[in-house]
Image (cartoon, coloured by chain):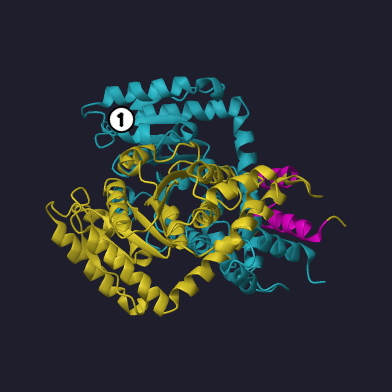
Chain colours: A cyan, B yellow
Amino acid sequence: MARDLGTLIDGARSGRTRDIARLISLVEDGSPDVPELMRAVAPTVGTARVIGITGSPGVGKSTTTSAVITSLRARGERVGVLAVDPSSPFSGGALLGDRIRMQAHATDDGVFIRSMASRGHLGGLAATTPQALRVFEAAGFDVVLIETVGVGQSEVEVAAAADTTLVLLAPGMGDGIQAAKAGILEIGDVFVVNKADRDGADSTVRELRAMISLGQAAAGGWVPPVLKTVASTGQGIDGLVDAIDAHTAWLTESRQLEVRRLKRAQEEVEAIALGMLRRMLESGERLVDVAHLSADVAAGRNDAYTAASTLVADLLGGTD
Amino acid sequence: MARDLGTLIDGARSGRTRDIARLISLVEDGSPDVPELMRAVAPTVGTARVIGITGSPGVGKSTTTSAVITSLRARGERVGVLAVDPSSPFSGGALLGDRIRMQAHATDDGVFIRSMASRGHLGGLAATTPQALRVFEAAGFDVVLIETVGVGQSEVEVAAAADTTLVLLAPGMGDGIQAAKAGILEIGDVFVVNKADRDGADSTVRELRAMISLGQAAAGGWVPPVLKTVASTGQGIDGLVDAIDAHTAWLTESRQLEVRRLKRAQEEVEAIALGMLRRMLESGERLVDVAHLSADVAAGRNDAYTAASTLVADLLGGTD
């Protein structure tokens, strides 16, 4: 093991926030040290509860996360927060505003908040999120909150990394529920209508409950509760944390925790394997020249499937 | 070639909208006939101009698309429209509202509008969009408009499929520009501030121009114009179509069209090749048992990189 990496890991294990931050930067940057880091932290996998928090912009994700942190801290739990920003594949700056909003916990040693951008490296978000989680687990956190903006595929990937997924909504965003977000019903373990002091909160709750009961036949066992909160005043937050605890208990008793974590490990392994294969394809170290194949496709002399088959056959055939 | 597929392709070539629609359904569903379809339509690749239209919900994408269609029709061009909905990986219903809003063109033989969901099959959106494009090209359309909601990675993938990408904004959404969307500067060839009769249009234009000139050093050659439109009244639309024509002319003269299309073909070939490899990984026809490997990772006995390396080595080693 590289000496510096070993020092960082030891530092993270003893709770040095600076070393935790450095290790997560390695993950974020897709450093060549990541495989070695992952070997070192493998034994502590599964030692933290992982809670995903997602929702559209404006529903109060950061405020709710902050309130949940306060409630968990009052119960004596050490809390790591990972804010994942999938919104731009270009920029590296992630959820800066959120970090600023969470300064309430800046002086608390039992809370570590870190934002992370996905820079499109080996395995993407599907791989980097569990890697960052393992760093938090190695550092001894009891709970890790993963917060992400609810856009497209990313919220599904983040939900896949969590044991319990909270889906946040706000009153008066009913259009959003109906139109684009049928998918949230399938990823939410607990639904939260935040800003519940606003008009329309009860009808949003009713609408959600109706949609959940429609989908209930397929769900099997856990009925996702729909809670009301006003995160800015703390109203309903203890009840939310109780609901998370109830879901944790259900996961354990039903052995769904094991099932979910196994599925998660498999997805991660496959994502990394695909990333490795992608690098091989793009590395230009093949017998077949991708640029030449592609030029034939662009000119209509060949089709993309035949070209792809040639590429795959060449890769699988090795160098003989 | 399957007899039915041949009949559909002949029908599409002679402009039968029902056959075009059926072929796009094959692409959308990831039908086993797609490779054969792609072989058949390969010769007409590159015969249409491809224009991408993207922007956040509420900026008026459908209204603008509709107005652009009217302007292109007045110039005698046959127009195909592909509305790509990446917003939900679960639901198959794509942009239904948009189809309804475009009924103005329902009786025009020179316009064909089709929405398409990406159902996560071989190669994803990065593969299905160019496949649908090829069907439009085989059917003899002069221009294909690809409309997509600007969320996350999907708009980048759609921009990658287009020769010219229009990025739509509306006044008073300046937060969005600054915060999440630094990436749009890199994909836009023409910027459109729609709903320009509203307050704040000029400041949105100024803000965009400033951001574009900041990024200009890297762009080389084409300076993306920032136009104002009121699509609902048609104001500014002819100017927009002129700007698209100017970009087409620049692409051709600078040979950037060739460069972009070659890059596009290469990305498509690689996306399909990766899809093939993914299927192999997930098919369970390997010597190594993925479930077993993953169980070790979930239990902390192994790490995901080592497991993925085993999987890849096994795949590349074949069946010996």
Q: Is residue B294 visible?
A: yes
Give the quarter of the image for residue A5.
bottom right
Give the quarter of the image for residue A241.
top left
- Chain letter, disc 1 residue: A
Q: Main secondary structure of the magenta part?
A: helix
Q: Is residue A86 visible?
A: no
Q: Is residue A229 left or right of residue A223?
A: left
Give the quarter of the image for residue A233.
top left
Looking at the rendered structure, the secondary structure element under dot 1 is loop
With respect to residue B226, does B299 lie above or below?
A: above
Identify which residue, B178 or B221, lies in the foreground: B221
Measuring 43% from the left and 33% from the top, which residue is drawn there?
Answer: A182
> In the rendered structure, which segment of residues is drawn in magenta?
B291-318
Q: Is residue B221 left or right of residue B230?
A: right
Residue on which the image places disc 1: A229
Quadrant (top left/top right/bottom left/bottom right) for the N terminus of chain A: bottom right
Pick out the residue farthest to the right. B320
Measuring 72% from the left and 51% from the top, which residue is drawn there?
Answer: B280
| Residue B306 is covered by the magenta coloring | yes
Q: Is residue A58 left or right of residue B195?
A: right
Measuring 61% from the left and 62% from the top, which residue is drawn there?
Answer: B269
Quadrant (top left/top right/bottom left/bottom right) for the C terminus of chain A: bottom right
Identify which residue, A220 or A1, lies in the foreground: A220
